[in-house]
Amino acid sequence: MAYKLNDFEVLELIGSGSFGSCYKVRCKHTHELLVWKVIDYGCMPEEKKQLLVTEVTLLRDLRHPHIVRYFDRIVCKETKQLYILIEYCPGGDLATVIKSCIKSNTYVEERFVWRVFHQLISALQTCHSWISSTIILHRDIKPANVFLDDGGNVKLGDFGLACRLDADQPGCIETMVGTPFYMSPEVMKGEMYNSKSDVWSLGCLIYELCSLKPPFHAQNIKELASKVTKGRFERIPVHYSDSLQRVLNHLLLVNQEQRPSVFDFICDSVILSHLPSES
Ligand code: ADP
Ligand code: MG
């Protein structure tokens, strides 16, 4: 079904991002809650418009329980606004979870960390094994781009910086994108962004979820690059298990040849033993 603007009732503004504002809306017919991202494309530079088209086209094709579902887009030519309709994630994002832990001086439960890890690995397996010999690199995995439903399950979203690669292509040439704290050693060195760079960012995200700070921190990019390429980081807080720390040691291996791919975790007994029975 093709949606029209007046099929929806706007409930509240959720937040503003780099592209525009996100609103919680309700479909007048099905009463379903959705999010629409409103984007003014009129005065947008061509490059930004291109990023937007990327997000829309990618999300339309991606269907996975742990990837934010894209429903439709509505173009309003009079106002030069684009409305992207996506699944509403009532639990907010992981950046907010981390912030509230810092504020209340608490940590997330290890069980939750394993669940996030497993679900994001599963989402990335779909991205990294895309159809028709094309794969998708997310390139901006960070807490603010991982959303939560009301059952504590996560969904990877915000594919605004993603890129498609032919399976025989070694990586993306244009590399300096994403969050500097989560930038992999190879990208820091000016090499291509590849699927292992997403694995590194996932490692940074899981680490931050435990430690409430990124594994590598610095005041400027030069100092950060030096820390990242050395690859030394503190252990996660002691109440987290050695097996979780070991997984992080693998995800954050400086040498991308040694760093696992998301497929290396399919039958990993350590992960399986930590999965909640209900998921
Ligand atoms: P940006 O990444 O450019 O900051 P986003 O569009 O990712 O912008 O997000 C803007 C705000 O809307 C953030 O506060 C984010 O948590 C929230 N948000 C984005 N998508 C959803 C969603 N599907 N469900 C709930 N909240 C969302
Ligand atoms: Mg975002």
Image (spheres, rainbow, N blue to C red):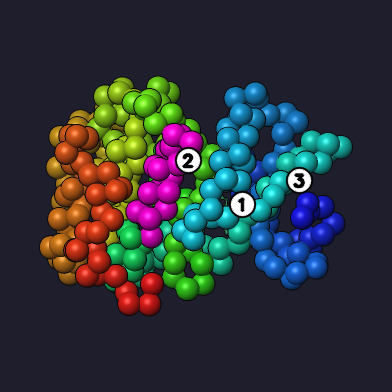
Q: Position of residue 68 (x, y in %)?
A: 54, 55
Q: Give the distance between the C-alpha atoms of the residues marked 1 and 2, in whole angstroms.
A: 18 Å
Q: Is residue 50 visible in the rendered structure shown here?
A: yes
Q: Is residue 254 above or below residue 73?
A: above
Q: Position of residue 164 (x, y in %)?
A: 48, 33
The numbered mark, 2 or 3, whose residue comes first in the sequence reads 3
Quarter of the picture holding the N terminus:
bottom right
| Crowd around label 1: few <14 · some 14–19 · many ≥20 (10 Å) | many
Q: Which residue is mark 2?
A: 131
Q: Give the distance between the C-alpha atoms of the residues marked 3 and 1, in whole angstroms.
A: 12 Å
Residue at 83% over, 36% down: 77
Marks 1/2 in contact by CB < 8 Å: the verdict is no
Extreme residue in the front direction = 132
Q: Which residue is mark 3?
A: 74
Q: Nearer the viewer, mark 2 or mark 3?
A: 2
Residue at 51% over, 50% down: 157
The answer to whether residue 59 is magenta is: no
| Crowd around label 3: few <14 · some 14–19 · many ≥20 (10 Å) | some
Residue 70 is tagged as 1
Question: Is residue 9 left or right of 189 when viewed as pictured?
Answer: right
Q: Which residues are magenta?
A: 119-138
Question: Is residue 38 left or right of 172 when viewed as pictured?
Answer: right
Q: Amino acid at mark 1?
A: Tyr
The numbered mark, 1 or 2, whose residue comes first in the sequence reads 1
Marks 2/3 in contact by CB < 8 Å: the verdict is no
Mark 3 Cβ and ligand 1 under 8 Å apart: no
Q: Amino acid at mark 3?
A: Ile
